[in-house]
Image (tube, coloured by chain):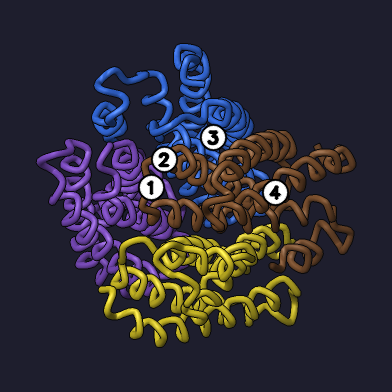
Chain colours: A purple, B yellow, C brown, D blue
Amino acid sequence: MHAQEMISTHPHVKGSTNDALVRCIEECFDCAQVCTSCADACLGESMVQQLAQCIRLNMDCADVCSATGMVATRRTGSNEEVIRLMLEACMTACRLCGQECERHAGMHEHCRICADACRRCEQACQQAMGSIGGMGARH
Amino acid sequence: MHAQEMISTHPHVKGSTNDALVRCIEECFDCAQVCTSCADACLGESMVQQLAQCIRLNMDCADVCSATGMVATRRTGSNEEVIRLMLEACMTACRLCGQECERHAGMHEHCRICADACRRCEQACQQAMGSIGGMGARH
Amino acid sequence: MHAQEMISTHPHVKGSTNDALVRCIEECFDCAQVCTSCADACLGESMVQQLAQCIRLNMDCADVCSATGMVATRRTGSNEEVIRLMLEACMTACRLCGQECERHAGMHEHCRICADACRRCEQACQQAMGSIGGMGARH
Amino acid sequence: MHAQEMISTHPHVKGSTNDALVRCIEECFDCAQVCTSCADACLGESMVQQLAQCIRLNMDCADVCSATGMVATRRTGSNEEVIRLMLEACMTACRLCGQECERHAGMHEHCRICADACRRCEQACQQAMGSIGGMGARH
């Protein structure tokens, strides 16, 4: 991913990027891809009926992560309140999806990998949230 | 839009749909399209530089509305906490985008229509939020 | 949907919209919502395993329709070659998804409604494709 | 990105992944993020009016890359004809966006990085297209 490289060349950023937010953007896009893939792999399992809730959470998580990644990427103007609320929604979507995937991690390797991606993204959102105070002047 | 018709045929819903949530889904997808269109129309204006913040909010609002519409559409299993947080993020994204569009509504008809769509979607999210208590048993 | 209203206020369009393309945009966003909803309803059926291919095509169709709707919405500058290729991909995604849904239409009302939406969107894409010649000067 | 890891654990794939397609998926998601970021950086430039076509192509390219990445990720059932058409649309979206970005690469570092991402993604799509013959039996 090139989030760091791209954001640091934004005319208003001039090199000083918020590293926690940049890491969060990358985890969001990674988690969106992993969740899309996990929903699809669950759908291919013979015990798919027991995985219906997992697939549901995977798809919701993919949608939320992807939107959060987009919104958090932008640096022209400002929209901090929305970034903050999306980080919060994303943290929760990742936590719930990660917990559900964790339950199937022993049976399905794709769920184990997805649980990890969700946990990393949840933490990255939390750290990004903490770091955003410093952007406060731009409110 | 066919949100009502589709959701009422879901095997777990069996005809009794949450009308406030269904209306919210339709407003979310409408607002996403309108905001995408408004960002594009603003970009085509000769005074585009004064519209940069408007375009930014339009694009964020489109991403958030679209993800909210997807998440709120699903009825298999449950993910109420995430729906609630997305409705909240969407309400705020629509309020801020609507306010900015309102400022240009006298000059640009696309901003006036977009401000209306944002306001309708904001209200629909608020009403959906109120209606979700009744889904509580499915938590 | 407000596609017609929005596009007709674009500074470069000045009122004369391509009606076939506008209808196509609306069908694309409608079909994306219906397909997302059908994938979710199929996932809630007890015979979900027999619906795996249907869910797969639903999700692909939703992604393609949604991207086509976005790309076809924009009027600043030009990108006709991409619009044309996306209309083609969308036509095919809708045709294949509609055919699969049709096979389950007797059993599942959501598949019947989705088959209709896919067919409408396929036709709208085809008509939009035919109408795009007239935009040729903007190539 | 974890596309390789995820796809190799899909129940129908059983370890033998199509490496060209996996690389393509990763380039698609990377290019979507880079294009979203470049559109936003262009919008923040003082000469934004000269960058309107670049922003337009950036946004279209992001939508197409993102949908292509999703569609190409799925391995349950099959939808090869749509994958192929999306790879074609994506190749063209990347080529046109990359060429436009290239024109501004001397002035704007974000356009230079974006032109590179587009070129990589275009090539990855082309190689994935070539590799898909081997999946033919699954048609």
Residue under pointer 2: C50
Residue under pointer 4: C121
Of marks 1 and 4, which one's residue comes earlier in the chain?
A: 1
Compute the Cα span from label 3 to label 1.
Answer: 54 Å
x and y, in percent, of residue D36 in the image: 49, 48
Q: Residues within 10 Å of mark 4 (few under 14, many from 20)?
A: many
Give me the chain letter of mark 4.
Answer: C
Q: Are marks 2 and 3 on the same chain?
A: no
Circle 4 or circle 3, nearest the eye: 4
**Secondary structure category for the residue under label 1:** loop
Residue under pointer 1: C47
Compute the Cα span from label 2 to label 1.
Answer: 6 Å
Q: Residues within 10 Å of mark 3 (few under 14, many from 20)?
A: some
Name the kind of residue labelled 1 in the image.
Answer: Met
Say above or below: B60 vs D90: below
Compute the Cα span from label 2 to label 4.
Answer: 25 Å
Name the kind of residue labelled 4 in the image.
Answer: Cys
Q: Are marks 2 and 1 on the same chain?
A: yes
Q: Are marks 3 and 1 on the same chain?
A: no
Q: Which mark is residue B107?
A: none
Name the kind of residue labelled 3 in the image.
Answer: Ala
Give me the chain letter of mark 3.
Answer: D
Q: Is residue A34 left or right of residue B107?
A: left
User: Residue at left 69%, top 34%?
Assistant: C88
Observer able to see residue D103 = no
x and y, in percent, of residue A27 in the image: 27, 48
**Secondary structure category for the residue under label 4:** helix
Q: Residues within 10 Å of mark 2 (few under 14, many from 20)?
A: few
Say above or below: D9 vs B108: above
Cβ atoms under marks 2 and 1 closer than 8 Å: yes
Q: Residues within 10 Å of mark 1 (few under 14, many from 20)?
A: few
